[in-house]
Image: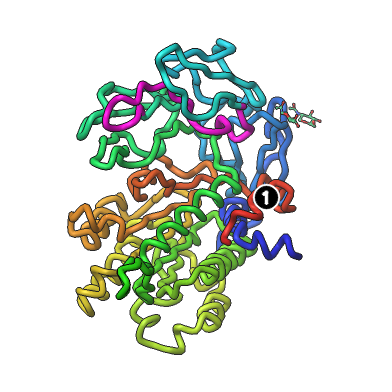
Amino acid sequence: MECKQQFKWLILAMICPLIAGAPSSMSKRDSSCPKENLNITGGTFVLSKGYSHGSLLRYICPNGYYPSVQSRLCQDGHWTSKTKSRKTPECKKITCPNPRVFENGEVIPYKDKHYVNDTTTYSCHSDYMFRGSADRVCKPNGKWSGNTPICGRDSDHCPDPGVPPGSSRTGNMFNLDDKVTYRCESLLTLIGSKVRVCLDGGQWSGTEPQCYAGFTYDTPEEASEAFSSSLKSNLAVSQQYEKEDQQGKKITMDQGGKLDIYIAVDASESIDQKNFENAKTTIKMLIDKISYYPVSPNYEILIFATDVTPIITMRDFKNNEDARNLMNIFKALDDFNYESRGDKTGTNIAKLYTAILGSMKIEELNNAMTFSETQHIVILFTDGQANMGGNPRPKVEQIKHLVTKNVPMREKNLDLYVFGVGNDVNQEDINGLVSQRDQEKYFFKLKDLTEVQEINDCHALKKQKQTQLQ
Ligand SMILES: *[C@@H]1O[C@H](CO)[C@@H](O)[C@H](O)[C@H]1NC(C)=O
Ligand SMILES: *[C@@H]1O[C@H](CO)[C@@H](O)[C@H](O)[C@H]1NC(C)=O
């Protein structure tokens, strides 16, 4: 129980159900699917509803392996799959991105491929200073443990930004306004900042890039830790400003109330009823989590699929005392049932951001001064790529423009987070929907329910116990 309390926050893990469930269809058919040719080489599979219509087949591979096809869905007598391949599915070995991109030093051992549990050790040539992790282990989620090792001279205005595994960098000058550009090896997607600029304060703009394969995930601990620390610093920035008291001592003032948080949850096709309930629980837990901070945010909560359904709008929240009561919000969430979503099961992310943009415009019209001083946080949970409504990126650009007015100082007034769940998440697309600055991570890619259940028992989380949220 105590464990549950402490890590209530990790309920984020519970958004994983967003992809885990069998996609459902409103229509009742009973054309079942064939039982043949479903095997996966080196693994097994489970079925959510046997061989009947709407059943989800999920492939399971042993530790250190990933399935070349993640799942199949029984639809109208056929097993469909998002991965277009005629080959028999197989369990493939998980590899970590190439560490030999490391510059001005040595990586041992020298190997072509690095599999789960393989270790590497890094050291610098003389005259170079070492930063980062000297020993790294390839983890089961396709990432190296620790931090990017860097050998730099650190004689320029900014420190050597390094070359993260699997990437290559152009730009070897690290003085003010110098730019470095990264790309990832083929088949890997760059998460984070493609271009970084050496800033006044001796720091690089943006977030260190990471190269993700399709099978690379953030563990719930990684996501939780990074999101918590980001949220914590952003909440701190938004709610406090320093002022000198009469004795000239600096005191921290609470701005109070100038924090608008937009939470949006995907309710599109692949969420079944049970997981839909879990998604609602996630929102409650997130709000509950934020209530531990000394802030009093305003909320807008949206559920979206083909259309966008507000549970509460920003204006209602601010205007209506009843609506502001969190218990009433929770009740409104409870009252929003699976059927309310209807049969419209697309993923219209553009429409979602349009709705948020609309609400923000209303807030600005209502009080432009307050709006300009407000911290705006947008948190999107989605299990798939936008499949209708067009590219959401222009809408996000409009939101950025509305909040920041292209004034660099105001950039910190907007934080855009995305939690992507499962294989269908198009990482490259989502990279354009999140903030990229201050060394913080704004996009999280989580795996699925089965993986998460394994760590829900708290064991993996003990380490964080002391540091989280206190
Ligand atoms: C598929 O796997 C099952 C259980 O391991 C086995 O009995 C069956 O013969 C396999 N089918 C094929 C076509 O390989
Ligand atoms: C990696 O090491 C851990 C701990 O020793 C072990 O439980 C796990 O099975 C190993 N994984 C692989 C893929 O070898």
Please indicate, yes or no, whether residue 23 appears anywhere in the rendered image: no
User: Chief secondary structure of the magenta span?
Assistant: loop
Vertical placement of residue 181 versus 252, above or below: above
Please indicate, yes or no, whether residue 464 appears anywhere in the rendered image: yes
Q: Relative to 421, is 64 on the left or the right?
A: right
Residue in the picture at 34% in, 38% down: 193
Q: Relative to 19, is 176 on the left or the right?
A: left
In the image, which residues are magenta?
137-160
Which residue is identified by label 1? Answer: 461
Residue 409 position by quadrant? bottom left
**Is 72 included in the stretch rendered in magenta?**
no
In percent of width and height, residue 113 lies at: 57, 16
Q: Quadrant location of the C terminus?
A: bottom right
Q: Amino acid at mark 1?
A: Leu
Residue in the picture at 42% in, 49% down: 442
Vertical placement of residue 265 versus 158, above or below: below
Residue in the picture at 70% in, 53% down: 456
